[in-house]
Amino acid sequence: METLQTTSHSLSDRQWAAGAHAAALVAALVTSWIAGVAGALGALAVWMLVRDRSSFAADHAKEAVNFNLSMFIYMCIAVVIGFLLVGVTVITLGIGALLTVPAGFLLLLAVCGLAVLWLVCSLIAVFKAYDGQTYRYPLTMRLFR
């Protein structure tokens, strides 16, 4: 069982940390989730504002940037795979559909799963940050350090 440790960060630090995750969430939702770079830019803006004032908020902002960039990369990979599946179907004059349709369905399920994971983890991160706890997103590539 995981123990929850709340450290004594100031309310301002916790608000900035939660704001980084919320900014990423709102920016990505407003611009369409597939344009997830906006989410990373929202968190990056918060990081630029707090990087010298609060290591707690800066760490949360970097985590949000990394997660949103990771999700964007995963979605780009899914789009490429989708185009390849359509290409195989066209090249084989429809015969390949016997394999590409089930594969496309699995790809659609994976994309929906990633979208739900993104939304749920982003909301969890907002609450954890506001409670003064650290949070590490799953499936995150640490691109921005």
Image (spheres, rainbow, N blue to C red):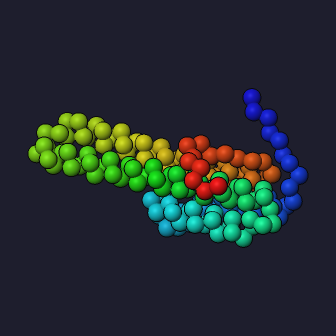
Pick whichever, 79 or 113, lies toward us.
79
Count of numbered badges drawn on the protein: 0
Residue drawn at x 60%, y 62% as measured from the top left: 24
Question: Is residue 92 at least partly visible in the picture?
Answer: yes
Q: Position of residue 35 (x, y in %)?
A: 46, 63
Most extreme residue toward the top is 1
Left or right: residue 1 compared with residue 142: right
Vertical placement of residue 145 versus 97, above or below: below
Residue drawn at x 75%, y 47% as measured from the top left: 134
Vertical placement of residue 92 versus 48, above or below: above
Left or right: residue 66 compared with residue 81: right
Q: Position of residue 71 (x, y in %)?
A: 50, 52
Question: Is residue 119 at least partly visible in the picture?
Answer: no
Left or right: residue 5 compared with residue 68: right
Q: Position of residue 130 (x, y in %)?
A: 77, 55
Quarter of the N terminus within the rendering:
top right
Most extreme residue toward the left is 93
Residue drawn at x 36%, y 43% as measured from the top left: 107
Pick whichever, 29 or 10, lies toward us.
10
Quarter of the C terminus within the rendering:
bottom right
Quarter of the image for residue 76 reads: bottom left
Vertical placement of residue 138 versus 22, above or below: above
Left or right: residue 57 compared with residue 118: right
Q: Position of residue 11 (x, y in %)?
A: 85, 61
Residue drawn at x 73%, y 60% as measured from the top left: 58
